[in-house]
């Protein structure tokens, strides 16, 4: 084997992976939301969840995307752990679709006659349609498809040269378990079993590997593909870890089944089903063991789910800190604890809102709430939607304690303060929801190639950095007069910024620099931003001020939005 053949093999693998990346990225861009809605709708029952996982994976051509999407659904509480496992099982079957596509097309036709025109036209499309999103994504998809099969062609040619220049026979006598480990390592390194399967198919096509050895490598690839989902579950909630561990067990058991019955299954495919081409035998073997594994797991899925629940128990079910262990006999003296909890709640909301616009939190040694943030995971490892759900859970726990206290307490001053604290918590939650609702708008403007839209994003981000820094400082302020003045300044600031954004939007609309849909988006986003900021100010007002200072604050005129 010459160095040219080696580099040709590596170049082919690189093109195949790059083509896969384009295909995956394009499908996420064009149909991401549709697939998410599809999974939500069709994962209510075990069988439909399995079929949905199979279908979506076949279309996306990546079980990793589907599994990671499922993890995010579980983390957000949108999908039960049992049904998430069902989707993951189906994804293993759907993941073999790419192998069938390569086996049916990649080795049976003249690849160059198809891929060269596709790559050429797609390349022109990427240049011509770069400002037309849909056509650009279609061109990107075609480019990925073309590169995928061109990479396969390179690997085939390099394998042909390899067999002529190198004698592999002595190495094929190693135990099959060695080739399983090779498949695992390759897949773990390149993070896709599809590429490993294609390398093996190319080796089969060149008659470098016997079918038994090729199958052993693919069994290792089945195990290696679980690495990505394991990484995706690290630091996540217990349900995510259950899904990841369940997927690992499924792949271990199916691979073990395939390894033990390797020869009988190959014989079955050869003699009973009439498959004689090693390429089709390999792909059929991969599909068969996944189907058998899903059938076996289907009948034991409920028990399997209970087993996983016992293995991964949430360390901390409560989303609150100061009131989570509040006992009934302590309710009458719990005002101070609830005050601390609501203060921490506002602090968390500020953190969460800043994350929407990718604003880093400035840590201060004087920040008393830092001492209470023992769940560093909340600010680092979890996704935004998981953190948002923690906030919602915390609000629910606060309101539950409040409902118990008002049944027990007869102290009018205590009830008055409690009502203020509940109003503060509700306003903070409104603020968090308002920011959540503009996430997609923020993504669109921050990633826009339109300079006007991008400059608007930068301006809003700078304004929010100042707003949340001042809000955080006020949360730590103990002087009511300074708090009142600070809240007045904040209110005047957000009113001025909102009015200026509206004025600028009208000006840009008059210049026809931005599209009509972008103008509507700007108005809606500005309104949501103002409402979110106003709600946070209202939360701080109820939390930090007494009646006298609240009356002074409420004398400020309102802005119509």
Image (cartoon, rainbow, N blue to C red):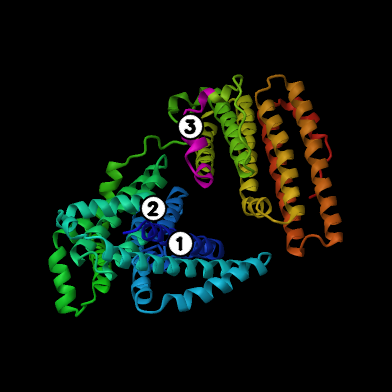
Mark 1 element type: helix
Few, some or many residues within 10 Å of mark 1 (<14, 14–19, 20+)? many
Please state the extent of the stretch shown in magenta in the rendering.
371-387
Near-viewer residue (351 or 391): 351
Q: CA distance from mark 3 to mark 2?
A: 28 Å
- Badge 1 is on which residue? 15
- Mark 3 vs mark 1: in front: 1
Quadrant of the snapshot with the N terminus: bottom left
Mark 2 element type: loop
- Badge 2 is on which residue? 191
- Mark 3 vs mark 2: in front: 2
**Residue 527 x, y percent position in the rendering:** 74, 50
Which sits earlier in the primary sequence, circle 2 or circle 1? 1
Which sits earlier in the primary sequence, circle 3 or circle 2? 2
Tag 3 and tag 2, C-beta contact below 8 Å: no
- Badge 3 is on which residue? 376
Q: CA distance from mark 3 to mark 1?
A: 40 Å
Q: Residue at x 72, y 44 (%)?
A: 458
* Membership of 472 in magenta stretch: no
Tell me the chief SS of the magenta region: helix
């Amino acid at each position: 084997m010459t160095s040219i053949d080696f580099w040709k093999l590596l170049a082919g693998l690189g093109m195949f992976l790059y083509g896969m990346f384009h295909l995956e990225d394009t499908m996420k861009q064009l149909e991401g939301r549709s697939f998410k809605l599809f999974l939500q709708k069709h994962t209510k029952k075990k069988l439909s969840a399995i079929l949905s996982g199979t279908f979506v994976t076949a279309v996306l051509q990546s079980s990793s995307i589907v599994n990671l999407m499922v993890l995010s659904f579980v983390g957000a509480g949108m999908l039960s752990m049992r049904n998430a496992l069902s989707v993951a099982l189906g994804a293993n079957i759907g993941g073999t679709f790419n192998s069938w596509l390569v086996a049916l097309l990649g080795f049976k036709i003249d690849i160059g006659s198809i891929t060269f025109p596709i790559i050429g036209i797609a390349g022109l499309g990427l240049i011509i349609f770069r400002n037309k999103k849909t056509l650009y994504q279609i061109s990107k998809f075609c480019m990925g498809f073309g590169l995928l099969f061109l990479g396969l062609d390179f690997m085939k040619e390099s394998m042909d040269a390899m067999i002529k220049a190198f004698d592999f026979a002595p190495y094929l006598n190693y135990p099959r378990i060695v080739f399983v480990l090779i498949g695992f390592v390759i897949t773990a390194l390149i993070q896709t079993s599809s590429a490993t399967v294609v390398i093996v198919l190319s080796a089969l096509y060149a008659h470098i590997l016997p079918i038994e050895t090729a199958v052993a490598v693919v069994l290792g690839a089945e195990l290696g593909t679980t690495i990505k989902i394991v990484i995706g579950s690290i630091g996540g909630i217990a349900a995510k870890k259950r899904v990841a561990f369940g997927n690992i067990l499924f792949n271990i058991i199916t691979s073990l089944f395939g390894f033990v019955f390797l020869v009988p299954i190959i014989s079955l495919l050869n003699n009973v089903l009439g498959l004689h081409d090693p390429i089709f035998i390999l792909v059929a073997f991969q599909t068969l063991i996944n189907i058998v594994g899903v059938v076996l797991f289907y009948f034991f899925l409920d028990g399997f789910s209970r087993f996983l629940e016992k293995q991964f128990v949430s360390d901390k079910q409560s989303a609150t800190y100061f009131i989570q262990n509040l006992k009934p006999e302590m309710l009458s003296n719990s005002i101070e604890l609830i005050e601390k909890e609501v203060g921490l709640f506002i602090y968390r909301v500020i953190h969460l809102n800043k994350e929407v616009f990718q604003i880093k939190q400035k840590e201060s040694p004087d920040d008393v709430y830092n001492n209470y943030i023992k769940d560093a995971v909340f600010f680092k490892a979890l996704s935004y939607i998981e953190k948002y759900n923690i906030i919602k859970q915390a609000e629910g726990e606060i309101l539950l304690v409040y409902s118990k206290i008002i049944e027990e307490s007869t102290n009018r001053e205590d009830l008055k303060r409690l009502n203020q604290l509940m109003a503060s918590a509700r306003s903070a939650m409104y603020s968090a929801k308002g920011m959540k609702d503009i996430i997609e708008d923020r993504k669109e403007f921050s990633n826009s190639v339109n300079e006007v839209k991008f400059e608007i994003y930068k301006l809003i981000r700078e304004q929010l950095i100042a707003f949340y820094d001042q809000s955080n400082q006020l949360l730590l302020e103990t002087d009511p007069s300074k708090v009142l003045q600070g809240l007045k300044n904040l209110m005047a600031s957000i009113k001025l910024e909102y009015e200026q954004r509206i004025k600028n939007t009208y000006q840009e609309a008059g210049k026809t620099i931005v599209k009509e849909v972008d103008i509507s988006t700007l108005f809606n986003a500005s309104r949501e931003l103002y409402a979110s900021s106003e709600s946070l100010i209202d939360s701080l007002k109820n939390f930090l001020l007494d009646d006298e200072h609240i009356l002074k604050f409420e004398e400020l005129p309102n802005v119509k939005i």
